[in-house]
Amino acid sequence: MRKKGITLLCIVLSIAIMQINIRLTSAHENLNLFDEILIQTKSKTVEYGLKTCFETQEDSKEICNYLISTLNLDNKKTILTRTENKDSYNVDFSSENANGYVEALKYKNKNLITINISNVSNENGLASLKNKVSASIGCRGKNIKYFQYLKAKVKETSENGGANNTNVINQKIIKILKFYGTENIETVNLNNGLSTMAYTRKFDEKIINNKLIDFNYAVCNYSSGKYIIIGTPEIITTY
């Protein structure tokens, strides 16, 4: 009887441990790589953006205005400027915390569409923005490519290497990337910091120097502090 009780207890404990491991694994897999870098480096988002490119057979003016409407950019707080010529149609937009454009360029018998959105925010809204843009495109686009970027300010602590030390932050990020099985990690020096390219298999990739790359980040020193700029597959904003 005692042996049965011990056996039953072991089974219950084993099931409990398995459930905990499943929850931890699931939580880890669902953790956004951008967010994990922000957490581990004690950094705060200041700006993020998304550039989306795709092909369509639809009329350039119609698709651009449809996207502006679907993305809720035709509101009273947003200034819209439209320009049109023989081969292109463009809608620039700007508001207190967001700016960008939706552009259509004629190429052969199709239109090449670019949606470029930048937001000033202290929260990482990239995942939500990408989902919103993807939903707005729906089945209207082909060969869709996404280019993401995020800029964050690093909290100045002794753990982060002090005010001017970019190496400590860089090594923290490399450690995170290696944990995810990232390959082709290469770091180069900048005038004001370090820039690293890598291949995570998580984003749209491109070939640079005969190597697959889908992740690029820089750790930079400015007069206003130390910043991390992240881009996929490479940084698409100035730094």
Image: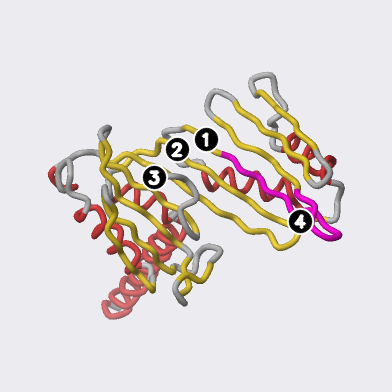
The residue wearing badge 4 is 141
Q: Quick one: label 1 or label 3, which is nearer the N terminus?
A: 1
Magenta: main secondary structure: strand
The residue wearing badge 2 is 47
The boundaries of the magenta stretch are 105-117
Using the image as rendered, state which of residue 57 and residue 71 is in the foreground.
57
Asked if the magenta segment contains residue 111, the reply would be yes
**Of circles 4 and 3, which is in front?**
3
The kind of secondary structure element at disc 2 is strand
Answer yes or no: do the residues labelled 4 and 1 have beta carbons within 8 Å? Answer: no
Residue 52 percent across, percent down from the top left: 63, 51
Q: Quick one: label 2 or label 4, which is nearer the N terminus?
A: 2
The kind of secondary structure element at disc 3 is loop
**11 up-or-down from 238: above or below:** below
Q: In the picture, residue 54 is in which quadrant?
A: bottom right
Answer yes or no: do the residues labelled 2 and 1 have beta carbons within 8 Å? Answer: yes
Q: Residues within 10 Å of mark 2 (few under 14, many from 20)?
A: many
Q: Amino acid at mark 2?
A: Glu
The kind of secondary structure element at disc 4 is loop
Q: Can you say which quadrant of the picture contains the N terminus?
A: bottom left
The residue wearing badge 3 is 239
The residue wearing badge 1 is 119
Answer yes or no: do the residues labelled 1 and 3 have beta carbons within 8 Å? Answer: no
Q: CA distance from mark 4 to mark 3?
A: 31 Å
Q: CA distance from mark 2 to mark 3?
A: 12 Å
Q: In the picture, residue 85 is in which quadrant?
A: top right
Q: Quick one: label 2 or label 3, which is nearer the N terminus?
A: 2
Tell me how the rendering is colored.
Answer: secondary structure
Q: Residues within 10 Å of mark 4 (few under 14, many from 20)?
A: some
